[in-house]
């Protein structure tokens, strides 16, 4: 793939976004007890035969969790992988319930924002056919 | 889905008036999906505004930001932090989104870049058709799944009016199918034609006030003390 189609990520911009939301996001990440109670409140998970990749906790750990773990070392491939998790696997209906108050939709929206800042987002026309979500 | 289309560049420039620093706020919800106000459309709009303003001596600073939805406060963290640096917000959400932003930031002009058109469905990529006027008292169960409020030129609840043309189109416009002719056909096909003679009381369209919905299990939570 050419540089134009796949430009390097703007690490500075990502770092600034991570820093801006660090307190709240890290608090949420550290408070998730992996109890999976959120799972049954997510209709995406329930309507897909309880496929674990639709669990709210899976979605935040594999998006926001990865962003903070890799920090400035994050690459465009990592972000592309995340695209499916934060758009296809979650519709941001804000219905999920976490007993300790982890705000899953806010986390997914934050991850989407980071992806958007690097020009990664779904398109809804021919050029951006559904496969581009994955 | 809510469907919208973009205003003309001239109208948008008119709304911006003398504002020199503008936050152009995209919506990742309905207006992204109907290709009117998502991240890509925000980018295109800014490019057009930039080009036009540059031709006239420049001086307009635009900042692009698309948030996931402009009708839910969960998604406003980044936008709220930014707005104070701008003289106005140009929103590409539907009318509800524009008002939500305006309510959050009452000191700032929040301007619509789109015309919110209707609730409808997808006919093809970039092609949408109106199907519901959100009247709040749905009659589809008795009209064969065809909305008379939207599709009858007179929004009649008890039709047809008598003006149906022989080819089954509306007296108001011969290219438009008569909604009640269609309803008749549909109900007949379903063996439920008796429903067409049911008299539905007249709807009082005038003096409408703002509606709100609280689902049954949440009534207690939002009850006024
Ligand atoms: S916001 Fe996402 S994770 Fe939460 S319930 Fe909705 S689809 Fe599931
Ligand atoms: S603000 Fe309007 S366009 Fe955006 S998601 Fe909400 S309803 Fe849809
Ligand atoms: S009757 Fe028509 S306008 Fe009213 S809710 Fe039903 S579909 Fe919508």
Image (cartoon, grey):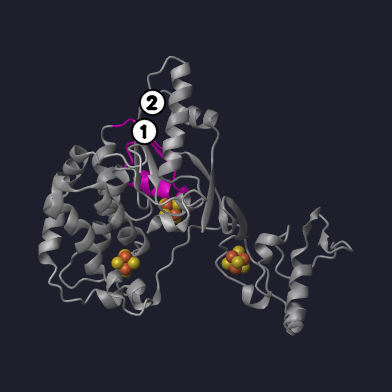
In this image, B192 relative to B88: left or right?
right
Screen quadrant of the C terminus of chain B? bottom left
Residue B162 is at least partly visible in this image: yes
In this image, B118 relative to A3: left or right?
right
In this image, A128 relative to B151: left or right?
left
Whether discs 1 and 2 lie on one chain: the answer is: yes
Rendered view: A10 above or below B206 = above
Using the numbered discs, state the Cα–Cα distance from disc 1 to disc 2 in whole angstroms: 7 Å
Query: Is B104 contained in the magenta span?
Result: yes
Quadrant of the displayed image that contains ligand 3? bottom right
Query: Is A59 contained in the magenta span?
Result: no
The chain containing the residue under callout 1 comes to: B
Badge 1 vs badge 2, beta-carbon distance below 8 Å = yes
Q: Secondary structure at mark 2?
A: loop
Residue A128 drawn at (x, y percent):
46, 50
Residue at position x 25%, y 64% from top? A59
Circle 2 residue: B19
Rendered view: B33 above or below B109 = below
Pick the residue in front: A8 or A93. Answer: A8
Residue at position x 46%, y 28% from top? B49
Circle 1 residue: B88
Residue at position x 33%, y 42% from top? A6
Residue B159 is at least partly visible in this image: no
The range drawn in magenta is B86-111
Residue B155 drawn at (x, y percent):
69, 61
- Mark 2 and ligand 2: say if the CB distance to the nearest ligand atom is below 8 Å: no
- Mark 1 and ligand 2: say if the CB distance to the nearest ligand atom is below 8 Å: no
Pick the residue in front: B17 or A46. Answer: A46
Q: Quadrant of residue B179?
A: bottom right
């Amino acid at each position: 793939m050419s540089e134009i189609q796949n430009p390097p990520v703007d690490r500075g911009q990502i770092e600034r976004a991570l820093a801006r939301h660090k307190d709240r996001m890290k608090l949420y990440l550290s408070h998730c007890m992996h109890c999976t109670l959120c799972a049954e409140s997510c209709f995406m998970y329930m309507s897909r035969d309880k496929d674990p990749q639709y669990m709210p906790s899976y979605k935040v750990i594999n998006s926001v969790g990865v962003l903070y773990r890799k920090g400035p070392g994050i690459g465009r491939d990592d972000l592309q992988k995340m695209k499916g998790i934060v758009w296809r696997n979650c519709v941001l209906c804000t219905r999920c319930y976490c007993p300790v108050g982890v705000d899953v939709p806010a986390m997914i929206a934050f991850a989407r924002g980071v992806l958007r800042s690097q020009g990664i987002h779904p398109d809804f026309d021919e050029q951006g056919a559904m496969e581009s979500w994955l | 889905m809510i469907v919208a289309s973009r205003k003309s560049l001239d109208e948008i420039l008119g709304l911006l008036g003398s504002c020199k620093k503008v936050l152009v706020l995209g919506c990742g919800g309905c207006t992204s999906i109907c290709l009117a106000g998502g991240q890509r459309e925000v980018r295109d709009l800014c490019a057009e505004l930039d080009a036009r303003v540059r031709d006239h001596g420049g001086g307009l600073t635009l900042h692009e930001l698309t948030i996931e939805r402009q009708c839910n406060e969960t998604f406003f963290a980044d936008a709220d932090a930014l707005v104070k640096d701008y003289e106005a917000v140009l929103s590409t959400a539907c009318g509800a989104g524009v008002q939500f932003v305006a309510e959050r930031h009452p000191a700032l002009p929040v301007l619509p870049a789109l015309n919110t058109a209707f609730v409808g469905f997808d006919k093809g990529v970039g092609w949408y058709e109106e199907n519901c006027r959100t009247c709040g008292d749905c009659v589809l169960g008795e009209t064969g799944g065809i909305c008379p409020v939207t599709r009858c030129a007179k929004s009649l609840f008890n039709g047809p009016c008598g003006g149906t043309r022989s080819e089954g189109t509306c007296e108001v416009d011969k290219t438009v199918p008569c909604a009640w002719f269609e309803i008749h056909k549909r109900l007949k096909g379903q063996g439920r034609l008796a429903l067409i003679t049911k008299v539905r009381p007249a709807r009082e369209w005038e003096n409408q006030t703002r509606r709100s919905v609280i689902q049954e299990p949440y009534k207690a939570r939002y009850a006024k003390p």
